[in-house]
Amino acid sequence: MHPSSPYLTTKELAQLLRLGERKVYDLASSEQIPCLRAGGKLLFERSAVEAWLKQSHTGPNLEAALNLPAIIAGSHDPLLDWALRQSGSGLAGYFDGSEDGLTRVRGKKAALCALHIYEEKGWNTNRVSAEFNDLPVVLVEFCKRERGLIASQGNPLGIKGLDDIKRRRLARRQEGAAGQKLFEHLLSDAGVNADMAFAGQSIARSESDLALEVKSGRAEAAFGLKSEAVAQNLDFIPIMTERLDLLVWRKAWFDTAFQKFINFCEGDIFKDQAKSLSGYDLSDFGNIHFNASH
């Protein structure tokens, strides 16, 4: 599915709305949903579908009166943050961790949120499925990104992995940050006392602040992003590649703000910036990982 296309096919619209193609045909035939006919095929103009979702009370169990603020909440990411500013979409970022993002989307205090919640066999999908299965939301991939240990320039402590940080001062994120939860899980598996490692450390509320804790010397290591290590001229020891997704209210998907943002992210300027920042993989950008049945 290509979010930037001005038209949706019957199959694409059915997938997005979680309806059978036959139902979409029925809606079109009865003129309950706007469509165009070209060469015997149905096409659905995005702007017209957007208006239908906002105004029609015959839509597929969607809340036509849903009033969502143009806010993206959840996990902080430097590429995402940059894209919001550069796209001119009008979306505002409020990044205070994945858990906060889920709460704000569920409470309709944000149109979408960024998530990187670790699961045994992947990222985000099980959590979203469990909490949003009866709500009209879509989970779409934004990027994959490298996460690991950030150390001082030149790595004077010789940190090579988790076993080397057992008695080091570690930077920490706020409680609701998915990266912090994952780090504590990894530390426990490595036999590191997290309470002692984080003792006395101030809370970094973004990935950028996390790297700055190491650069300033307040912490000897952090569990952060390669892009932030590179930006601060710090050493980086890779641990994993994680997936960052966007959880979007289906109605917000068609809003001008989100469409403008997605269109920007499909352009060369965005791709070049990802390469410049380092540590990003955009090969699966736009893949749908969950689409609620509502």
Image (spheres, grey):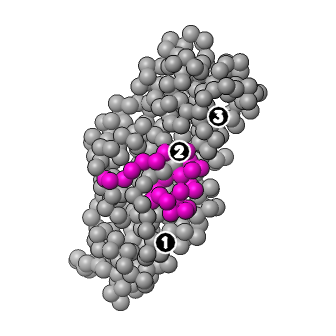
Res 10 → quadrant: bottom left
Give the Cα separation between the discs numbered 3 and 1: 36 Å
Query: Is 141 positioned to the left or the right of 42 in the image?
Result: right
Q: Residue at x 29, y 48 (%)?
A: 87
Q: Which circle, 3 or 2, is nearer the viewer?
A: 2
For the residue labelled by badge 2, is the local secondary structure a helix, a strand or a loop?
A: loop
Query: Is 9 positioned to the left or the right of 221 in the image?
Result: left
Crowd rating for badge 1 (residues with CA inside 10 Å; few <14, some 14–19, many 20+): some
Question: Which residue bears the numbered disc 2?
Answer: 96
For the residue labelled by badge 3, is the local secondary structure a helix, a strand or a loop?
A: helix
Amino acid at circle 2: Asp
Q: Observer-nearest residue: 294 or 11?
A: 294
Q: Which circle, 3 or 1, is nearer the viewer?
A: 3
Residue at the outermost top position = 156
Q: Observer-nearest residue: 33 or 106?
A: 106
Question: Which residue bears the numbered disc 1?
Answer: 18
| Residue 99 is covered by the magenta coloring | yes
Crowd rating for badge 3 (residues with CA inside 10 Å; few <14, some 14–19, many 20+): many
Question: Which residue bears the numbered disc 3?
Answer: 183
Q: Residue at x 33, y 44 (%)?
A: 85
Q: Residue at x 75, y 27 (%)?
A: 193
Res 39 → quadrant: bottom left
Give the Cα separation between the discs numbered 3 and 2: 17 Å
Give the Cα separation between the discs numbered 1 and 2: 31 Å
Q: Which residues are magenta?
A: 89-113
Residue at the outermost left position = 39
